[in-house]
Amino acid sequence: MAHIIFRSFFLADVVVLLLVLLSPPFAAAQLKTGYYASICPNLETIIRSSVKQSMAQSQIAGPAALRLFFHDCAVRGCDASVMIVNSNGDDEWHNPDDQSLKPDGFQTILAAKAAVDSDPQCRYKVSCADILALAAREAVSQSGGPYYQVELGRYDGRVSTKSSVVLPHADFNLDQLNAFFSGLGLSQTDMIALSGGHTLGAADCPFFQSRIGTDPSMDSAFASQLRTTCAGQTFAFLDAATPAGFDNSYYKNLQTGRGLLGSDQVLYTDQRSRGTVNYYATNQGTFFYDFANAMTKLGRVGVKTAANGEIRRDCRTPN
Ligand code: HEM
């Protein structure tokens, strides 16, 4: 008898433990790749061509849309809160950490939303949060990066405040980067793979100028090149080798002291993350696989449901 009771307790414990282990952090259970299959069957095609058009009009559109997705998910979860414009100026965009988000990224999302809503079947049925996730995937794949299935079914949040913005900074060390990403339920490997997003786009000179001539981990020829660049223009490419191509040259740059931000270069300087950098530098396929996987995990952060969210009609204002 005691044996049977013990067994059933044990089995119940195992079931509970399995449920805990199998459920991802934060509410992500309702996300699925085919979410809009019957609601808006052409969704992915519509977004693909809209983003393609935006990228043809602006070189920054793709990188800015990818960064926007990260800044959305990292603050209040992937709920398009980053898109909200409040008339009193108290919104995420007014936080200094979001001021460098380029208008081209917001435009890309608004154009995609307009394209989706111009299809009568889809009108007001697709969340801005899901459009952000799909646009980020398009930015990556249309730049030569991996094409991966995007989980969908997010609802949009109703709140955006300046004070809620907490993001990693360009001078963060490995411990600070890990602490930030583990707060999102992401591992060091996820963080290193996602940092590979810096294979696209640019950074304004103030984000890295203090490293020039002072940071021994920066290659000296690269330093003088950057000094010249910033004397003539306001920004430098995050991956000077192939700024518009999504590839693993970001990691190759780190191996030669050509990482632009301190938070990039530290991934190679610190022994604890160098192995992963070296691995991605020689295995682009693994980088692509891990990047897609980490984007999927990022896309699950703090997801809203019908109970605490809505499908916003205008991405800039709650309904
Ligand atoms: C690891 C911590 C991170 C830090 C400290 C960081 C910091 C920065 C900074 C300072 C810039 C330059 C902004 C400007 O001058 O306009 C930038 C740009 C960018 N970031 Fe990050 N970032 C991080 C992670 C990420 C992640 C996870 C992604 C996406 C997967 C991402 C994607 C981008 C892109 C694509 C740009 C270029 C944007 C453009 O050209 O408009 N970053 N980042």
Image: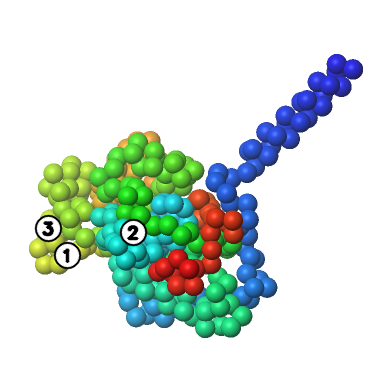
Q: CA distance from mark 2 to mark 1?
A: 26 Å
Gap between marks 3 and 2 measured at Cα:
35 Å
- Dot 3, crowdedness within 10 Å: few (<14), some or many (≥20)? some
Graded by Cα atoms within 10 Å as few (under 14), some (14 to 19) or many (20 or more), the crowding at tag 1 reads: few
Is residue 286 shown to the viewer in this render?
Answer: no
Which residue sits at x=65%, y=42%? 22
Which amino acid, by three-letter code, is at mark 2?
A: Asp
Report the disc number at residue 45: none
The answer to which quarter of the image holds residue 87 is bottom left
Residue at horizontal 16%, vertical 53%?
209
Residue 62 locus on image (x, y percent): 38, 69
Q: Amino acid at mark 3?
A: Arg
Mark 2 and mark 1 lie on one chain; the one further toward the N terminus is 2
Q: Is residue 260 above or below residue 217?
A: below
| Labels 3, 2: front one | 2
Horizontal placement of 144 versus 210: left or right? right
Between residue 149 and residue 219, name the one nearer to us.
Answer: 149
Pointer 2 residue: 91
Write down the residue under mark 3. 227
Colouring: rainbow
**Position of residue 138 measured from the top left corner of the image (x, y, whole percent):** 47, 69
Q: Seen in the image, is 267 located left or right of residue 44? A: left
Q: Which residue is mark 1?
A: 234
Foreground residue among 95 and 68: 95
Q: Quadrant of the N terminus?
A: top right
